[in-house]
Amino acid sequence: MISLYAGTFAVSAIMLVVYFFIDKKRDRYLMMLFCSVALCNLGYFLLSISKNLDMALWANRIAYAGNVFLPFFLLMMIMNLLKFIYPKFLTWILIAINTAMLFITCSGNILPIYYKDVSFEITNGIGSLVKTYGPLHISYKFYLFAYFGAMVGIIIYTMIKKAASSFKHSVFLAFVVIGNITIWLVENKISSDFEFLAISYIITEVLILLLY
């Protein structure tokens, strides 16, 4: 399992390098999307090799730093690519919401709001956190659903209004977003020690690079 996390982090780091060779226009949101995936997978890897609670908590925070901002960068990239017009202040509102969510998700062992209680254990040589969820843990699910809903809504809107630069682009992006939603939902329903989103994010990067 550790080697699998190490592999996903290595691939996401390589994808970040590949990005700079493909996107000559340097789309800042696309670049930050690739940085977020690498950061997220780094957190998963560090968590798997953690030896104590403090290290595991910081690894978990690194993973959430990538996870929390990733849908924001994906949404902004989609809006720009499909030429969807939005008020400029929306960016700052979303950044404020993202920052608040990051504070909530990283509050483990500091405030009992996201995790009521958290401990550390090593199973088969792999570090993991044993968590009792707090009252604000469900807020992260609403947060993700809101972003995914906004992405799907904007894609459908631009398709109906024919405002998208390409109908094929809209369909392609819809496939990418819905694919991530499906994997996230399945992961929440099954019991697994592996974070399948680590691989899903890399697949998303490959598909987006193909689009570009």
Image (cartoon, helix red, strand yellow):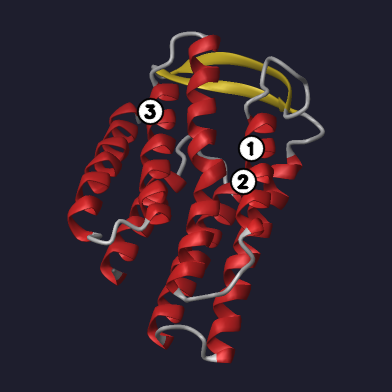
| Residue that numbered label 3 is attached to | 45
- Looking at the picture, tell me which residue is in the foreground, 124 or 98: 98
- Looking at the picture, tell me which residue is in the foreground, 194 or 107: 107
Across and down, in percent, residue 157 comes to 61, 82
Looking at the rendered structure, the kind of residue marked 3 is: Phe
Q: Is residue 177 above or below residue 187?
A: below
Q: Judge from the rendering whether residue 114 lies leftward or rightward of residue 209; answer left or right.
A: right
| Residue that numbered label 2 is attached to | 95
Q: CA distance from mark 3 to mark 2?
A: 26 Å
The residue positioned 63% from the left and 50% from the top of the image is 92
The residue positioned 36% from the left and 58% from the top of the image is 27
| Residue that numbered label 1 is attached to | 99
Q: CA distance from mark 1 to mark 3?
A: 23 Å
Looking at the rendered structure, the kind of residue marked 2 is: Ile
Q: Is residue 27 above or below residue 10?
A: below
Across and down, in percent, residue 26 comes to 30, 56
- Label 1 sits on a secondary structure element that is helix
- Looking at the picture, tell me which residue is in the foreground, 112 or 155: 155
Foreground: disc 3 or disc 2: 2
The answer to whether mark 3 and mark 2 are in CB contact below 8 A is: no
- Could you classify mark 3 by the number of other residues whose Cα lies within 10 Å: few (under 14), some (14-19), or many (20 or more)? many
Q: Judge from the rendering whether residue 29 lies leftward or rightward of residue 185; answer left or right.
A: left
Residue that sits furthest to the front in the current view: 88
